Image (tube, rainbow, N blue to C red):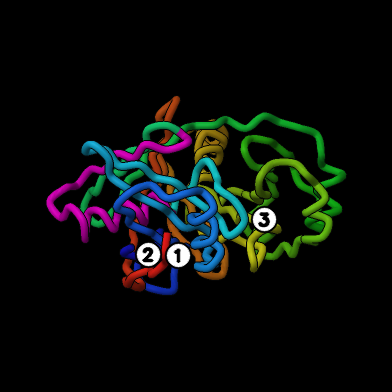
Amino acid sequence: MKYFVIDAFAEKVFQGNPAGVCILEKPLKQRIMQNIAKENNLSETAFVYKEKEQYFLKWFTPISEIDLCGHATMAAAYVIMNFIEKMTSVVTFHTKSGILIVEKKGNLFEMDLPCYMPEKIDVIEKVTDVIGIKPVETYISRDLIILLENENQVKNIKPDFDKMEKLNIGLGVVVTAKGKEVDFVSRYFTPELENKEDAVTGSSHSSLIPFWAKRLQKNDMVAKQISERGGILYCKNKGQRVKVSGTAVLYMMGEINIEY
């Protein structure tokens, strides 16, 4: 099968978040996709196949299948538009999270994602023990969302991952604050990743966009994930949906050879 690695939310290689993209001729068994994702050892590998003129998309971490991944969706759309159907500028995916549409607008790939407004919860004491600083507030959506006072706090925190693993609140842990040069910043942690931190997480912005739209009283925002690699996300709050845009670049292309 054709295999690509795309740096999503990046203007040049070694920035943003790398995702593997496997272009399939037919669906694969779950265990085979899981083994490929484990072998690739990226935060996510996307598996794409076309059936009756419709694209189907699945995402796997090295450990399990997940229900939504933003940067791997962008990576899959990049591959289709640049190598599979070069004349198209819109790709529709059927996924575990419903229909996801990616549209190319200039050099940006705009994803239409579900919107999840986080709910406030009181786990400040537990969270303080994990991140080493008392948060302003804590919220839950798919992920645990931790609001800090400022960007410097987000940039400098060093979580205790052993304690984080025992939290059992949400899929991942997002720390966020109002930005200095952008509207808001964030970082995304999860103990299941090899380096414990995701570089740029499109799916977490399904919750961060409505959260910050309400706090900032604006629907068009620019966000930055301030991981080591980092990435810029152009965000739009659309009520029941959110739009997340960014640039992407090709890192590698090749073939995976397995018997199945």
Q: CA distance from mark 3 to mark 1?
A: 16 Å
Return the residue found at the far top.
Answer: 240
Return the residue found at the far left.
Answer: 87
Q: Between 158 and 19, which is closer to the camera in this rendering?
A: 19
Which quadrant is the N terminus positioned in?
Answer: bottom left
**Which region shows up in magenta?**
72-97
Return the residue found at the far front.
Answer: 260
Residue 241 horizontal/vertical position (percent): 42, 30
Are the residues tagged 2 and 1 within 8 Å (C-beta)?
yes
Q: Secondary structure at mark 3?
A: loop
Residue 188 horizontal/vertical position (percent): 61, 54
Q: Is residue 173 left or right of residue 62?
A: right
Q: Secondary structure at mark 1?
A: strand
Query: Amino acid type of disc 1?
Result: Pro
Q: What is the number of the mark on residue 6? A: 2
Q: Residue at x 32, y 66 (%)?
A: 249
Q: Residue at x 52, y 65 (%)?
A: 42
Residue 89 horizontal/vertical position (percent): 19, 47
How packed is label 3: few (under 14 Cα within 10 Å), some, or many (20 or more)?
A: some
Query: Amino acid type of disc 3?
Result: Thr
Query: Amino acid type of disc 2?
Result: Ile
Q: Between 27 and 174, which is closer to the camera in this rendering?
A: 27
Q: Is residue 29 magenta?
A: no
Q: Please name the residue that numbered disc 1 is placed on.
A: 18
Q: Earlier in the sequence, mark 3 or mark 1?
A: 1
Q: Earlier in the sequence, mark 2 or mark 1?
A: 2
Q: Please name the residue that numbered disc 3 is placed on.
A: 190
Q: Secondary structure at mark 2?
A: strand
